[in-house]
Amino acid sequence: MDEFSLIQQFFSVAQNKTAQDGVILGIGDDAAIIKPAEGEVLLFTTDTLINGVHFPLDTAARAIGHKALAVNLSDIAAMAGQARWFTLALSLPEPDPAWLKDFSEGLFALAKQFSVSLVGGDTTRGPLSITLSVIGTIQEKRAIRRSTAKPGDAIYITGHLGTATLGLAAINDEITLSEIDLSNCRNKLDFPQPRLQEGYFLRDYASSMIDISDGLTSDLDHILRASDCRAVIDSESLKKALPATIDLPDRKVIEAALYGGDDYELLFTVAASKVLKLEQSWPHTFSPLTQIGEITKGEGMVLKGDNGQDMKITACGYNHFHD
Amino acid sequence: MDEFSLIQQFFSVAQNKTAQDGVILGIGDDAAIIKPAEGEVLLFTTDTLINGVHFPLDTAARAIGHKALAVNLSDIAAMAGQARWFTLALSLPEPDPAWLKDFSEGLFALAKQFSVSLVGGDTTRGPLSITLSVIGTIQEKRAIRRSTAKPGDAIYITGHLGTATLGLAAINDEITLSEIDLSNCRNKLDFPQPRLQEGYFLRDYASSMIDISDGLTSDLDHILRASDCRAVIDSESLKKALPATIDLPDRKVIEAALYGGDDYELLFTVAASKVLKLEQSWPHTFSPLTQIGEITKGEGMVLKGDNGQDMKITACGYNHFHD
């Protein structure tokens, strides 16, 4: 089977089942032709997943397909945009129809869920790696950036933090989890849910926003540096950010929440004047909302302990090429 | 040095020197924000280069940076579009400042030449591979596709064919070239010039268009299948498509022109009524123009020999995962 048959079999056909909104010409020419609506600006992002780095070596093909798209959609969510079109660059050691079938099913199930269309790609022989590029759209001047947090803003997260990293720790035999917790944590690691609905809803509320890919401290640090602010994180709130079923010492829970990556929840700030309305209007079908701290003047991050003492914390999330 | 410092040092800074037309927010947030002009549609394409597959293992970093962008810009050229913005996904085994400096210089020199802006990226540790995604723009309904060639159209190419493949053959000691020819052929292999000016000019002339990446027969076959046509190629014209200095038997020259990949010239068809005007108005600063054959009714490709005999030819360009 040659490259063109591969692409045709698994991607050209499948993509016809996803939304075609704005696609004038899809896969099969030198470039796709797409048409945004008037008044929209584009959001453009790219992310690579490498075997054994961004997912464990034993990860199911379906999960890899899902995750490759999810991490990119999460970036569009973090700008408060709507994801629309994507390209897929897939390197794999050899064409394996069973693997490709599962991979494409994982990819297209998520694409369908969020009405995003595959419009182009490139398949090459090489070590397994997947790079997706996504274009999203948003009304001009409505995108939420990292650089616009202000002292006095409340700091929020969606969903649970640390779940994915605990799943990875359990796979690596570093901790022991109950069967149900292991299954939940592994599911979060393998099938992260991009918070597109939540992000889009937040365009009316968030003063700044980022998605948590490298870990809370690491990604909060990006907001703080870009916005020239300081953050005080409340350790009691952080404890609530892990699912209640997981039975681990508080210290482990807080460490996982602070430094664990791969959760793909949203981290955002909200002006004090909008906090009440946000909490009242947050749909119950969304990923849960938790206030975890406050933006203040200054720089750096502080963890406010339940003993009343403050502890300085630093960005130590997962980092490629870290010394 | 961590991932973020790497990106900042070589890419965030350098990108400020390229055109910023339409860039509302560049590198450094979850996604770039870009704004096409009214009435424009988008062209969206992605291509991966893998070490030892898409360039010889000894290729200079500067050439790799150039070529990674060039092959993507070539796809925009083949649609008759203008290249505008791109993202860079770079996997490399370890951060090597000298390599990154040369790579980014090659990349940005070409980006500057065609006023295209780097707006985002992802750097990961892994085997050397580079995936770029490019967004181009074009007035609605002006893009030139593969599927619109018609019987009676003339078939044209820009520039020389087979040069890059002869360079590769010489590197692999399969043929011997003079020093100057080797240098020219290696230069074409390492630093292909995307034909963006030529492609944009052709929006008024071409009935169909593609860039020659896999080889003439392979890429012509894409046009023929998409347009449901047949092509007759003239072998005398094809001989002229190699630089006159190269001293090789006719058979080798024609083989290189028919099957050699990596030239990134444009292959296009022109209605008979537009041929004269095209030839008269083709700027002399452009890559030279050569008519190499004609589109007819039917299917497949035929090579018309100088002995008057026709020979059936098939698509045998370079093909990943080819049996």
Image (tube, coloured by chain):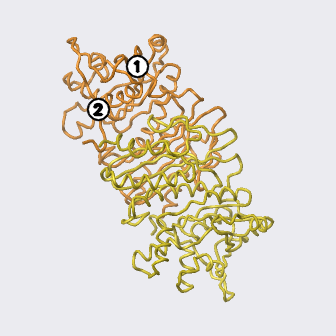
Chain colours: A orange, B yellow
> Image quadrant for the N terminus of chain B?
top left
Q: Residue at x 44, y 28 (%)?
A: A146
Dot 1 amino acid type: Leu
| Local SS, label 1 | strand
x and y, in percent, of residue A61 in the image = 38, 48
Q: Which chain carries label 2?
A: A
Q: Which of B16 and B208 is in front in this view?
A: B16
x and y, in percent, of residue A209 in the image = 44, 26
Examine the rendering and report whether any part of residue A163 can be seen.
Answer: yes
Examine the rendering and report whether any part of residue A183 can be seen.
Answer: no
> Image quadrant for the C terminus of chain B?
bottom left
Q: Nearer the viewer, residue A272 or A112?
A: A272
Q: Which image quarter: residue A220?
A: top left
| Residue wearing tag 1 | A289
Q: Residue at x 61, y 75 (%)?
A: B241
Q: Residue at x 48, y 77 (%)?
A: B180
| Residue wearing tag 2 | A260
